[in-house]
Amino acid sequence: MRNLLVKTVANAAALAVAVWLLDSITLTGTNLATRVLTLLAVAVLFGLVNLLVKPVVKLFSLPLFLLTLGLVALVINALMLLLTSWLAGKLDLAFHVSGFWTAVLGGVIIAVVSWAVHAALPDDD
């Protein structure tokens, strides 16, 4: 349970940094509390997308991983971020990523920040 909480906090922090750095990734809300709750909900949604969808996409794109020496992972991360943005819109969460290249850069930022926060926070592993 603690590991899930650590991963959610790491995702939320990474998404917050991406929202802060990139103008094309938006998180809107009337006050700070609603933005934080929306960010946590999007972090859970992003974690679910990465848990359920990403392994299937990686399996089907295995030849591309080999051909591009793993660079297709940037595209897959961008697609997972765009899928999260689309699902957030369907769930009336105020999170939006506009554009593929923004999603690529946002995916890189989220991966780096999430790794750093996850390394800094303790977990059960």
Image (cartoon, rainbow, N blue to C red):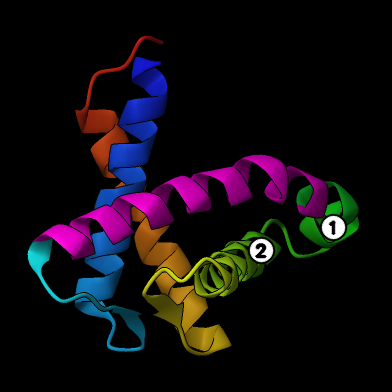
Looking at the picture, how far across and down is residue 41, in whole percent?
38, 52
Q: Is residue 55 magenta?
A: yes
Callout 1: SS: loop
Q: Residue at x 27, y 42 (%)?
A: 116
Amino acid type for the residue under numbered disc 1: Ser
- Residue nearest the viewer, comparing 93 with 1: 93
Q: Which residue in the rendered view is the most extreme toward the top?
A: 124
Magenta span: predominant SS is helix
To which residue does mark 1 refer? 61
Looking at the picture, how far across and down is residue 81, in whole percent?
53, 66
- 50 left or right of 10? right
Image quadrant holding the N terminus, namely: top left
Q: Residue at x 51, y 45 (%)?
A: 47
Q: Over which residues does the magenta segment extend?
A: 33-57
Looking at the picture, how far across and down is residue 104, in whole percent?
51, 75
Q: Are discs 2 and 1 less than 8 Å apart at CB?
A: yes
Q: Does 103 appear above or below 41? A: below
Rounded to the nearest angstrom, the CA distance separating label 2 from label 1 is: 9 Å
To which residue does mark 2 refer? 76
